[in-house]
Image (spheres, rainbow, N blue to C red):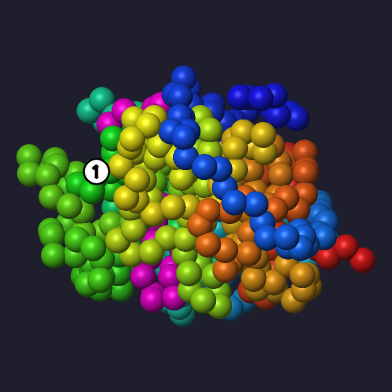
Amino acid sequence: MRALKRRSSIGLATLVLTACGGGGSGGNGGSPGPTPPPPGNTPPTVELQQVFGALALARPVSLKQAPGSDARWFVVEQRGVIRVFNNDPNASGAGVFLDIQDRVDDGPGEAGLLGFAFHPGFPATPEVFVSYTAPGQAGFALVSRISRFTSANGGQTLEPGSEEILLTASQPAGNHNGGDLHFGPDGFLYAGFGDGGGSGDPGENGQDTTTLLGSIVRIDVDGGSPYAIPPSNPFSSQPACTGGASGVALDCPEIFAWGLRNPWRFSFDSVTGDLWAGDVGQGSWEEVDRVVVGGNYGWNDREGAHCYEPPNGCDESSLDPVAEYGRSLGASITGGYVYRGTAIPDLAAHYVFADYVSGRVFAVRADSQPTVAPMELLDTSLFISALAEDVNGELYIVSYNDGTLHRLADVP
């Protein structure tokens, strides 16, 4: 991998090592590179403005507001805490919304409390869903959990003792844990799982639909016990997933789409409802996917739009990424959001995302067809672990190593 402008070995930087392949070849298979942006499609001009500069955050990995409310911000710290602070430029302190450090295995590297999602009816429905890694058992490095927590004080905090574990997935290695959670416009909960870690997906979990690993799942948390399966899921007729633990390998009905290496961050377009994901690559390519029900996104047959295993003549029947970029621009994609705010008119209807390794911020037009090269918006010195969208559609950036928050702004 070429020498990118700066990197350290802290925390999520382990993701850098796995993105660079850990010795995997990430072959190109002779496939063509991404199509350049159309002539005249110049990148919007934007800048970053640091916000909430008086806060001290430790290893933040996710930032959100509650549905329909701009009064507060909630930030996940990887160690196992969700903190909350007022949406005030001068906010100097963040309280504790949820503390589950007693059950979170947060390292080293990519493990920890990784994502959360408010129930769409919050706080009237006082439920928040979280994704975290716990210590593994029976030879597994970790176990990923999707859990429900409830509030007993009108949404001010969550009760640590209220946990209801909905889904678990044993992780063979300590990396590629996914961790993002979102409710879709259909009211169902979507959760991302990585391929189980290791170089090159040694268990070939990405193409194995009898495991939740390497997929985005969709469940109905308002029906069934502990959840129901949306009938339009591709394998909805099967019993709840066991990952073959019962001795019978059946397709998992929770799966919405598969063939993913590590969909670290994904989101829904607030206007169209389209699901966008940034899938962290192996040795050569980072990719942006527009994810559809029943979609197979190729890993580990392909990395991006290119053959991976084998490096030539692979199965290319999977869906192509909307965009991809190689190691000259970065090595670990952080998925973002389609911009639907009003403060940056030229950015409207662009999917904005970043790279954790290089610190670059990119965009592709939301109407792009596979496969294009992204437009570079910014080249920063930040370790960008997440992007965030406020209730008005404006975008923010979370910097992992120094715990700072930034707003994307128009250039005067």
Q: Where does residue 8 sit, x and y in percent of width and height? A: 68, 26
For this rendering, which residue is in front, 395 or 34? Answer: 34
For this rendering, which residue is in front, 142 or 104? Answer: 142
Q: Quadrant of the N terminus?
A: top right
* Residue sitting farthest toward the left: 247
Predominant secondary structure, magenta span:
loop
Element class at badge 1: loop
Q: Is residue 346 above or below residue 132?
A: below
Residue 318 in view here: yes
In-image side of 79 versus 306 (left or right): right
Tell me where residue 366 sits by quadrant: bottom right
**Dot 1 corresponds to which residue?**
208
Residue at 77%, 73% in the rendered image:
345
For this rendering, which residue is in front, 72 or 274? Answer: 274
For this rendering, which residue is in front, 317 or 223? Answer: 317
Residue at 43%, 33% in the rendered image:
29
Q: Is residue 191 rendered magenta in the image?
A: yes
In-image side of 78 versus 45 (left or right): left
Q: Where does residue 215 sit, x and y in percent of width and height? A: 34, 50
Q: Is residue 383 rendered magenta in the image?
A: no
Q: Where does residue 92 sit, x and y in percent of width and height? A: 78, 55
Local packing at callout 1 (Cα closer than 10 Å; few below 14, some 14-19, many 20+) is: many
Q: Quadrant of the C terminus?
A: bottom right
Which range of residues does the magenta coloring cover?
Answer: 182-203
Residue 225 in view here: no
